[in-house]
Image: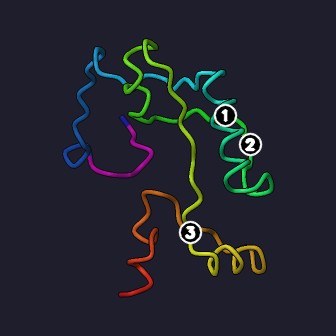
Amino acid sequence: MKQSSCMPADRLPIVNLHEQEFTPATYNNPELTRKIWGSLQRALGAERVVRKEPVMGAEDFGRFNLEGTIPSCMIWLGAVEPEKVEKSRKDGSTLPSLHSALFGRWQSRQ
């Protein structure tokens, strides 16, 4: 069998699929989301609270609501230094994502 990676068959990773293990979808409770939205707008200013389109991604946060028995709402908090945001706006550079080694103030101190 030809491999698209051109890696020899004896060097390919072994993948074991466990069908009972999965990451459930994160569900933002609409009522709780509205409350948090309003609170954040009042606390931070409406111009600083941005509504984003839902995304499909794996996130273990979906487990915290105990299969829907506890209302939950996941928010994304902008936490990149303002200087990096301004640079990105000017030159289109990519901002570090949450799980990036480039994320966080500690990086600028190294």
Q: Position of residue 74 (x, y in %)?
A: 53, 36
- Circle 1 packing at 10 Å, graded few (<14), some (14-19), many (20+), is few
Residue that extends furthest to the bottom in the rendered view of this protein: 110
Judge by depth and name the residue closer to the eye, 13 or 27: 27
The earlier-in-sequence mark between 2 and 3 is: 2
Q: Secondary structure at mark 2?
A: loop
Question: Can you identify the residue that label 2 sits on?
Answer: 51
Look at label 1 and name its amino acid.
Pro
The residue shown at (67%, 34%) is: 54
Mark 2–mark 3 distance (CA, rounded to whole Å) = 18 Å
- Circle 3 packing at 10 Å, graded few (<14), some (14-19), many (20+), is some
The residue shown at (67%, 73%) is: 85
Q: Position of residue 69 (x, y in %)?
A: 43, 12
| Picture disc at residue 54 | 1
Question: Can you identify the residue that label 3 sits on?
Answer: 80
Q: Are marks 2 and 1 in contact (CB under 8 Å)?
A: no
Q: Secondary structure at mark 1?
A: loop
Q: Please report the bounds of the magenta region as a residue range.
A: 2-8
Please identify the quarter of the rendering in which residue 22 is found.
top left
User: Is 4 left, or right, of 39 in this rendering?
Assistant: left
Q: Point out the frontmost of discs 1 and 3.
A: 3
